[in-house]
Amino acid sequence: MRYLLYWWILVAGISVAAADAPHPNILLILVDDMGWGDLGCFYQNERAKSGQPAMATPHLDQMASEGIQLRRHYAGAPVCAPSRASLFSGVHQGNARTVRDNAFDMPLENSHTLASVLKQAGYATALIGKWGLGGGQQQAGNPNDSTAYPTKRGFDYFFGYLDHIAGHRHYPAHDPATGPRNVTAIWDQDRIITQDCDKAYSTDLLTARAKKWIYDHEKANHDSENNQPFFLALTYIAPHAALRIPTCAYPAGGGLNGGVQWLGQPGRLVNTAQGVIDSYIMPPYKDQPWPESAKRFATMVGRVDEAIGDILQLLKDLKIDRNTLVVFTSDNGPHNASSFLPWRQDPSFFRSYGPFDGLKRDLLEGGIRVPTIVRWPDGIPSQQITHTPSQFHDWMATFAELAGVPTPARTDGVSLVPTLTGCPDQQQPSTIYVEYHVSGKTPALADFAPQHRQITRRQQQLIGCGPYIGVRMGIKSHQDDFQIFDIAKDPRELHDLASQSPEIQKQMKDRVLQIRRVYDYSHQKRGMIVHRPYDDEFVPSVDAKNVQPGLRFSLIANRALPWAAQATSHRTETQLTPGIQFPDTWANDTKGFAAQWQGFIRIPKDGDYHFFVQTDANDGTRAFVRLHGQGGMVLVDADYPTHGQEVDSSAAVGATEADPHKTGKRPVKLRAGLHPITISYVHGAGQHTPRLKFSWQGPDRPHSDIPTNFFVHVP
């Protein structure tokens, strides 16, 4: 077939260029509702050895042996839409602007995404699979009405499921249609191709299209003598309900010459679109004395495993596998959902949550800790396992470093490159944080600890604090205590240390107020996200000794950057300035630079505050203000072309499909005292010299500039 014609050209010509690539290709594989315990190398192999029902994932096990297992990696949320929003935007749920709780099909805010950052770094970008963050009419989004359609959030190419509910249909041309359009839409850029998807099973369809896209990209590189790296987000809808199974066995082999192949023929898009739909159980499971639902689920997991092996073989065939970073992870813990089919998934059969308790929608470990494997032969030593905590929002900083571009200041995460590459002593700690609301209770599964059965969910919150995890469920007041667990010693969260840890309790209660913004955005179609019982609390100040006047000014780059950036590894010089002022060296600059001020702002009185930023009018000028350090509260986001217009502290800036200036006016409630502050600034090249005006409005204070004596630092 045409797909295979250039095999010899690719092997002969592209391999040399790929080996010399300065930055790796990045393949992010996200599955839907696969639990930490569903992988062989994480948990299932142990079950098999003890004679319990178990699933096999040999290809993922092999991938793990060739790279690193992240065994304490946390999803952005315990359900898919907010989790994916945190993954792709690089912010935890406390700073998410539009997608929190169960806000399905809401438009992801118009800001930096993994795709837009990597596209700026010169990568070709594609999303193949489920999005669910596009906005537009719920269950009937489209490229015109969906303001956050993937191609509007940095992806050059999109193929797959735009809407959330559509992502429950593994046979889009056969399963019950969704939404007012009365079709389960499979989009190929701006065109619905569902009518061509006869007998096309979701895992096979997405795998084949991903293989074709990778192949086409590498062929284009070869034909143009280019070496453009790629970023592909391959987001499967398996093994989430419905419990649909394939039409036939996975084709033998893999890569260029085997496995699933994209045929592109209407009615037979892939080579497995034949036979009887929903009919094939993998042989190891077919004759087991298991419930039908277990056989189906195991087959779905096995199909994903075979697909990963197929794709990894393609990378090897194209001679690009050594310089391709492959990340495999899941959007949240295992599900127990029903569907239009008669079978309901029972996560206890294989103990999909592993050695933990909790499911999807729970902030117990089983609902939020996800299986994560990373492979990159040129950069990651093999046979590695880490228990260092990390979370979805860390991938933005990680990918930015690998791509050779600065990390956006808006990002709540830290780069995981030190951990991945075998230098854990250089790893900055991650901010582990989730807030979530949903009705209902945890299920009363027999192998859950008694205290974890039938817990009222509703308001839930999770915070990391050193070796400890704090969890609150059914929160009624900010005075409610966190349960505190030493997760390394107590992974099932059986021994609450709260009574022994009053100082840690206070740290957690203070920190959760310092690293979040009150949700500030409403949507005319899908309403306001729930009010949280800690929304009206004042953000506590911090103790700082021996403070001195002024802020520390750090030059990040002597040129304009595409966004306000973190200073982490790019700082080149530091000096003191009296407040937000430019050193003489840069005060009259017209060529562009990037810088950052750090220190404390002194809040004179408890109360409600609004903040404002105004910069010079050069096109590339941007600014970003954060309180309380890395992962802390986003205060003002002017990290976009403002053309000199004033930007306020609305937490809804960048939101679409609603007017943030009508809904995004909630004040920031601050306690009197010192609050750590970071002001990131980019001066775009142009006729205007640098300008950054920072002002406030608060108790007994009209809208006015913040005097320099309200800024201090610790020497």
Image (cartoon, rainbow, N blue to C red):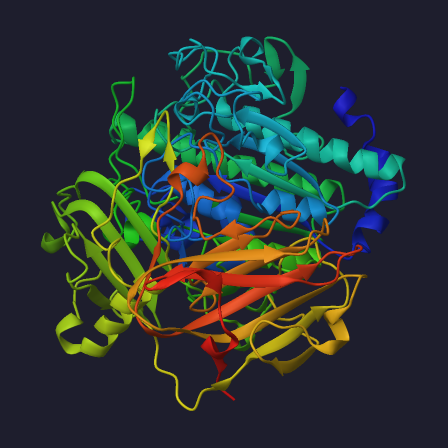
Q: Quadrant of residue 332?
A: top left
Q: Relative to residue 642, is residue 631 depicted above or below?
A: below
Quarter of the N terminus within the rendering: top right
Evaluate whether residue 411 shows in this view: no
Q: Nearer the viewer, residue 640 or 375?
A: 640
> Which sits in the foreground, 692 or 263?
692
In the figure, is residue 180 to the left or right of 327? left
Residue at 48% of width from left, 80% of height from top?
712
Whether 36 is drawn above or below 71: the answer is above
Residue at 22% across, 67% down: 484
Question: Which quadrant of the view contains residue 538?
Answer: bottom left
344 sits to left or right of 410: left
The percent position of residue 206, horizontal first and vertical second, equals 56, 28
Q: Position of residue 167 (x, y in %)?
A: 43, 26
Looking at the picture, how far across and down is residue 43, in whole percent? 36, 52
Left or right? Give the position of 182 relative to 122: left
- Can residue 536 be spotted in the picture? yes
Q: Residue 25: where, in percent of width, then height?
A: 69, 48
